[in-house]
Structures are given as C-alpha cells and as structure tokens.
Image: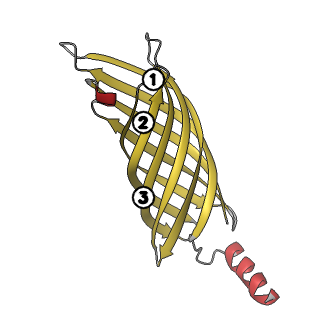
C-alpha cells in the first residue's frame, strides 16, 4: 500500500497523466463589467459600470479519457455600481455545467448554466451564464486557473431592462 502511494506521488511529480476526477472547493477574484439598456425610453437609456469581484465555488469533475465533465455552484460578491446612478448589482449565484479536455496538468473547459443576481434596490432575477476557463494543477490537490463568465438578463425583474455582465477571474481550487 505504501509503495503504491509513493509511486502515485512520483508519477504526479514526474509529469504522468493527471486525473481531474475529484470534488473541489475554491476562491476567485477579478473584475466585472456591467452594461444595460432600458427600453422604456426612446432611444433606449444605456448605462454601465465596473468593479472588483470576489467569491467562492464548489464542484465536481469526472474525467473520461481526455474528456472532462462536471458541475459547479458559485457565489460572487459583485458590488458593481451603475455610473451616475445609486444602483448596485450586489450578488450573483450561478449553477453551471462544465465540459472540456485535459492535457495532463492543463484543463480547458467551457461552461453554461443559470445565474441569479440581486441589486441594492430590491430588483432580482434569473438569467443565463456561459463562458470558458483554463486550470493548471500545481500539486495533487491544488489547481490555479482563469475564467470568463458572460451573464445575460433579458427583461430584468419584469422591467424593460436588458443587462449583461462579464467577469474575468483568477481561481484557486483545493481538490479532495
């Protein structure tokens, strides 16, 4: 038993194929950009904002050969203020399916799912999220990566507002 564990550790250190199958927890931080158009005005009133974002995520991946499939739940603290308006988009929670390909220590994935955001003025709604990312296994249990999310909200909270949020994040995951 000890020799097989030592062999596995040596394989990982020596660059042998890495198995991405595992549950994981992680943190992320980056920058977010918000754009919207209020169609109750003619022409539509457009506004935007940007700010630092941070959050946490949990998920599970399973590897089939080079193909990797899984899911992830994520919470992000946004606090993005509309320029010139006292309105903040505060929180986002997402549930995403992930799929991609592993090349030993590198993993490239795309993701898609549902996202729910809240504002400081009581507006909240569901939308969709899609994006892509890349992760690199630093050790057997630690991975670092980057990701991009695009969120879309049409007729936000039954208004004539269509909103888009883009997030670019650095991630750090602990794999069990």
Q: Residue 62, relative to residue 115: is it above or below?
A: below
Q: Earlier in the sequence, mark 3 or mark 2?
A: 3
Q: Residue shown at 68%/79% (left/top)?
A: 11
Q: What distance separates the C-alpha of mark 2 from that of mark 1?
A: 21 Å
Do labels 3 and 1 touch, CB within 8 Å? no
Residue on which disc 3 sits:
97
Q: The N terminus is located in which quarter? A: bottom right
Q: Earlier in the sequence, mark 3 or mark 1?
A: 3
Q: The C terminus is located in which quarter? A: bottom right
115 displayed left or right of 52 = left
Q: What distance separates the C-alpha of mark 3 from that of mark 1?
A: 28 Å
In the image, 85 versus 117, the foreground residue is 117
Mark 3 or 1: in front is 1
Q: Position of residue 175 (x, y in %)?
A: 65, 63
Q: Residue shown at 54%/64% (left/top)?
A: 60
| Residue count near mark 2 (Cα–Cα under 10 Å), binned few <14, some 14–19, many ≥20 | some
Q: Position of residue 34 (x, y in %)?
A: 41, 27
What is the residue that sits farthest to the right in this orientation?
2
161 displayed left or right of 109 = left
């Amino acid at each position: 038993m000890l020799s097989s564990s030592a062999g596995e550790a040596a394989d990982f250190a020596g660059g042998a194929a890495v198995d991405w199958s595992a549950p994981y927890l992680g943190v992320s931080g980056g920058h977010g950009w918000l754009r919207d158009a209020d169609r109750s005005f003619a022409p539509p009133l457009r506004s935007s904002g940007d700010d630092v974002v941070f959050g946490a995520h949990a998920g599970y991946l399973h590897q089939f050969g080079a193909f990797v499939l899984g899911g992830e739940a994520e919470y992000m603290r946004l606090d993005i203020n509309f320029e010139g308006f006292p309105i903040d988009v505060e929180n986002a929670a997402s549930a995403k399916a992930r799929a991609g390909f592993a090349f030993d220590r590198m993993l490239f994935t795309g993701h898609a799912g549902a996202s729910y955001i809240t504002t400081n003025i009581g507006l909240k709604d569901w939308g969709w999220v899609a994006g892509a990312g890349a992760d690199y296994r630093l050790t057997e249990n630690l991975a670092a990566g980057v990701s991009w999310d695009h969120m879309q909200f049409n007729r936000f909270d039954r208004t004539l507002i269509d909103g888009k949020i883009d997030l670019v994040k650095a991630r750090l995951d602990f794999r069990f």
